[in-house]
Amino acid sequence: MSKKETVQKKKKDAEIFKELKEECEAFFAKKEIELMEAMEKADPILGGTNSVIPELCTALGIASWFTAALQLRAIGSEMGPELIDAGTNLLGSNFMCSLQRAGIAMMENDLYPTPTMIVGTNSPCDAVVMLGQMLLNHPPWKEIPRFSLDVPYQKSEERMDYFAGQMREFVSFVEDHSNRKLDMDRLREVCEEANQAYQLMNEFQELKRSLPCPSEWNWGFDAYTIARILAPGTTEATDWVKRLVEAAEIRVKEEKGIDGVDEKIRYVWFDVLPSFSEKLFPRMEKEFGAVLIMDMFAYNPPWTLIDTSSEQEMFRSFARRFQTDDPMVRQAMATMEMYTGDIHRIVHDFSIDAVILPTHRGHKDINAAVKIIRDMCKHIDVPFTTIGCDMFDERFMSVDQIVEKMGIFFESAGLA
Amino acid sequence: MTWIEPSKAIKDFSEISGMIGNAEVRNWQDRKGKVVGYFCSFSPQEIVMAAGMLPFRMRGTGSSGTELADAFFSEVCCTFPRHCFNQALNGEYGFLDGLIVTNGCDHLRHTYENWKNADIGTPFLHMLFRPSRCGEEMAGLYRDNLAILKDELEKHFEVDISDQDLLNAIRLSNRTRKLQRELYELRKAESPPITGAETVSVMVAGTAMPRELYNERLESLLSALDGSERRMDEGSAARLMVIGACNDDPHVCNLIEESGGIVVVDETCFGSRNIWQDMDEGGSDPLGAIAKYYVNERPSCPRILGDHDRRADWIIDAARAFGVDGVVGQALVACDMYASEFYMLKPKLRDAGIPFLQIDAEYVPAFTGQLRTRVQAFIETLG
């Protein structure tokens, strides 16, 4: 490739990434408009703590929201700290996940669109489960129809059928309370569209095996947000992920990584991304050449595709995908073998140099499993550390403090 | 306000509940009996009893630190599993022949994982998954899980657990429940013959000794208390209800009762939540009866989805039935479930005209001066 062609190619992948970022915002804006219009027209709105079957709302043409997506948007805004403090005051304690405390404040201050149906589940963690129960018991919403799903812990076929049965009940519930009848052919069509996006997300993850990694910290999470939360089963989402793959492929072909970053350390951040990611991860790249290869929401194992061969198989696929693929639910609704197995495989498959557990203060489950993961990392000889930050409240531990900790860790592990 | 000296029977129960490896557990093991620990009140003690073994409810009684457990659990985790696990690591739970852990909360779930990975040496270790919703289908799932537990107990301990064994265990448990209900009935009296702190000891002892012996001693205690002259020796006290999770230490009740209150009823997982409902003794499927009881019939806890209204109604009804002046909610620090449950409960109690005090406390008593001040102030507001 001539120098001129390389420059043109460079411009092309950079341009694609720039467009994709702008479109991310457009997906959010579109979702907000959908919700506002539904409220204005008194159309059905499904709200809750989990997007149980994301394709269902697309197929029925009803607006939906789920708490974490709205909370993350709010917490990333100027009012984030105020919401957390308001939630702390309402709850009377500060040990619950700050994201969920902000959620309580949002609920009490009418910052969630009023739903016409509410759904809660027993996953992925105590804090989300209880926020879901608070939504179900929120006095102004007391008359709103509600539905709870019990996600089973065991991952056997029998348990999948048990959960698939509840998924069917859930669909009936949504039909009953939206006055819309689900057309199974339309649902199949949406699922097949969604499968394309998931397949592309799987391809994107595979590209991150490349040395250097062709992706900045955010793209895996953004793809998840668009394909699973904001526009599931739509051609727009598929197109977005397709162009993401194309942009990453350009970098892989050119054997180049993130612009301006000399990749020296490849690490796993095995949890949710913090609300201050935009300040943290680029500094890790610039100061240490440390590139986030995988986080819990951009993680690999591959997403399973929805089997559309029959109605029964579709529901089994929905159950399987929610229980065993959805980030956090996958890890929380299983024994530690699932957790350690994922990290082990990522370390092996993606040439990982270090494993970082942020040990977010609100994530009690991972805080109760640190030694198991540490021992596993020691066993496979990969440096491991914890941080102990609050991933949604920078006031607890600042980005400077985290970067300093990481610097000491990388140096002591002989990585920097 | 002081109390007349408690009876010998109450002292016996206090000795049993006041330590982990109590004399009755030792006697049981001296007779080659097996002991199986369990963490959560949703665990089917009846199956363990049907296997001829002693079910022992896990707690951190007597623990003074979590130094060893802190390598496994960070400081944001609940101190209840941390203290229990610390005791396991320093050998205090060496007497267990088995342990059943349930998916009660994030902390407890990983207690199983840590127990498994820490090489504590408990010969039998089982993770029992309980559904998080009420319903027939959920009871069916739990029955399947109980069948797996039963099979594993049979294989590991080389015992047979027949339907008749299960039925006998159900009857024995129901007998306990009936006697405990009689104990609670006595507390409805204007001047109850037993304190809240003493009741905690009696209830906890029931989870830490052979059930036949417990029932026998409880019958004796009830006979002694029924019509006894034992009364508070001065003044009238504010009648309080304590609600919360693993309230296995009489400390909080003591603190209330030293501050001018009397605890007359509770809604805790060592307390009355276990006693109001009997298990079905008449069906042809005792395992199914056990599953239905734990999933659908007995009062639930905050981890059960969509059941908050029923719990709140029960608390308000009990508060009225026992003539309660106020409710004290005891949440363990780091417990998202109870912090949220109390948040939802507060307006309901307010609407019912029942004053409520929430205290967040560590599992092992700490900052008692502050707690005492808050409890005293609360009692003063009750007039």
Image: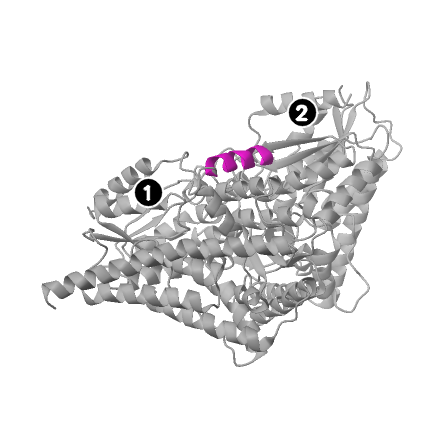
Q: Which secondary structure class fits the magenta region best? A: helix
**Dot 2 falls on which chain?**
B
Boundaries of the magenta span: A80-91
Q: Which colour scheme is used?
A: one colour
Q: Are labels 1 and 2 assigned to the same chain?
A: no
Between marks 1 and 2, how big is the CA–CA gap?
45 Å
Residue A411 appears in view:
yes
* Residue A118: percent from left, percent from top: 63, 55
Answer above or below: position of A114 versus A253: above
Answer above or below: position of A249 versus B87: below
Q: In this view, does A281 lie to the left or right of B289?
A: left
Q: In which quarter of the view is residue A303 placed?
A: bottom left
* Residue B139: percent from left, percent from top: 69, 63
In the image, residue A87 lies in the stretch drawn in magenta: yes
Q: In which quarter of the image is the N terminus of chain B?
A: top right
Q: Which amino acid does label 2 sit on?
A: Val
Mark 1 highlights which residue? A279
Q: What residue type is labelled 1?
A: Lys
* Residue B65: percent from left, percent from top: 48, 34
Q: Which residue lies furthest to the bottom in this view?
A: A309
Q: Residue furthest right?
A: B227
**What secondary structure is marked by label 1?**
helix
Looking at the image, which is closer to me, B141 or B11?
B141
How dense is the environment of label 2, judged by Cα within 10 Å: few (below 14), some, or many (20 and up)?
A: many
In the image, residue A46 lies in the stretch drawn in magenta: no
Q: In which quarter of the image is the C terminus of chain B?
A: top right
Q: In which quarter of the view is residue B187 placed?
A: top right
Mark 2 highlights which residue? B375
How dense is the environment of label 1, judged by Cα within 10 Å: few (below 14), some, or many (20 and up)?
A: few
